[in-house]
Amino acid sequence: MAGEIGSGANGYLRPELVCPAGTPAALRTAVDAGADAVYCGFQNETNARNFPGLNFTLAELEAAVGHAHARKAKVLLAINTFPPAGRFNLWREAIDAAARIGVDAVIVADMGVANYAARTFPELRLHLSVQAGASSPEAIRFYCQEFGVKRVVLPRMLTVGEIAAIHQQIPCEIEAFVFGNIGMMAEGRCSLTNYATGISTNMDGVCSPAADVHYEEDAERNLTTRLGRFVIDRFTRGENAGYPTICKGRYRCDARTGAYYAFEEPVSLNLSALLPDLMRAGVTALKIEGRQRSRAYVQAVVSAFRRAVDDILANREPALAELVALTEGRRETEGAFRSKAWR
Amino acid sequence: MPAPTEVNFASEFAARLVDGPRRLLISIPLAFMQPVLDRVATHVAKSRPEMFARLGPHAGKRFLIDPIDLPFVFILVPTAAKPCLSAYRRDEYPQHDAGIAGTFLDLYDMISGTADGDALFFTRDLRVCGDTEAVVALRNALDDFGNSAADTVLSAFGPLSGPAALAISALRAVRGNRRHGR
């Protein structure tokens, strides 16, 4: 049953499967595919996937909450960017709307936004966004004590062992990413897009804004990707490509011969093999990244993880579907979750 | 397990199945297609007017839709008041603000909600040019079709929607066989 936390035959706690939705159709797809909770955002800078044509109007969110609740799924609203000085009203209005509509939780990153929500709507459940970058028990406890945060979404820089240790030292639930985009940059602190385009990932809600992305393919089908005036990568004919994000670009520098991936290669996180370990480590919710992806992605990834989690709970060998076809550059990584030796 | 000669025969037969309609399409005057394209554009606009809100400032732009395995390309101008879909011969190089290119079936599967555009981009099966922001907006707007944008397009064919759906299914089967080397 969606939304219920219980234990499986082998003593695992049943984790909540938290899935992405960039549109109302994607939300319905996620619910049908077995999501326990779906996270989404408004059509503005208050969320970290502020892409053209994406996200929800007030009316769409209201209908989506009704749809999800009728099927015992939760809706989590991401209001997880940082308001610039003088523009707090937009974030305040988003919190007001979330409380009025009756979402199951709001995912916040900014302390001012968290404070406003906690003081104005004490019954509104707060989750701490990965964008807050809270990775130590001390930092997480601060958010719990000051704002009543009930769940923290951990940054993608901790090993499973570190997650288990943190779990013992904090008074709130843990949500961990298990699939999707992953970068080397500290969430909520990356200013590379801002440097290249003048648009802030953390305040405008968009990494590599599409207006600044340019693709050029020559007659031999070599593809050059640019962000603003910077070349991010060049892919030869037939070579798998990645997003034009700076942290996954290939660069030249004096210390190396030829272009190389200075930070991270085009690759996606896939922790399907680590699911039992995460569930033993005390992770309450497993998060799938990808609000900017299509319904086809949502359907395939959510279904695969639904089956895998249910198999583990039933003491069956998890049937892990082949998801590499949906990964960036058609490559997968377990990132830092297995070892700090990553990159 | 079929013998190698049977595999080759099946592939050849499949290729003829695909090449036959393509040859036929080369000879069709584009003017004959326009009434169907008009119906598609009008039908989509009436079925899902909210799509234009998702497009925002990109609603009036000219999108080049290039099914690379067909002898013509389309220009889509998705304005709410009078959406327009027109076919052009490849050598006409119609002006456009943004372009999306892929095989007919990959493009069709994208609007059907059965293929992920990003995944097709990663494997270089989908090409994007021009105004990337407009392309992203169009992709997201089409992906929000509740059931399927493709179903809406097919239903615009009226009494021919059944045969058109069958033709798509046959093309999918041929593609599946090719990808699996059968």
Image (cartoon, coloured by chain):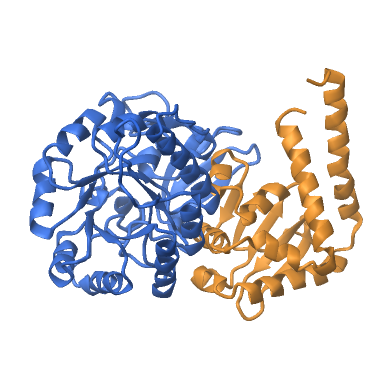
Find residue B136 and report its horizontal and vertical position in percent: 51, 58
Q: Is residue A48 above or below residue A170?
A: below
One can see residue A343 in this view? no
Find residue A41 and report its horizontal and vertical position in percent: 36, 62
Find residue A184 and report its horizontal and vertical position in percent: 30, 37
Residue at point 65% right, 41% down?
A219
Q: Is B7 left or right of A133, judged from the image as shown?
A: right
* Quadrant in the picture for residue B19: top right
Q: Quadrant of the image for the N terminus of chain B?
A: top right
Q: Is residue B81 above or below residue A316?
A: below
Looking at the image, which residue sits at the far front? Answer: A9
* Quadrant in the picture for residue B43: bottom right
Residue at point 55% right, 40% down?
A223
Find residue A179 and report its horizontal and vertical position in percent: 40, 40
Residue at point 58% right, 51% down?
B128
Q: Quadrant of the image for the C terminus of chain B?
A: top right
In-front residue for pair A191/A13: A13
One can see residue A338 in this view? yes
Q: Is residue A78 above or below residue A93?
A: above
In-front residue for pair B69/A107: A107
Residue at point 43% right, 42% down?
A232
- Rendered colour, chain B: orange
Image chain in blue: A
Instruction: State how many labels appear.
Output: 0
In-front residue for pair A328/A171: A171
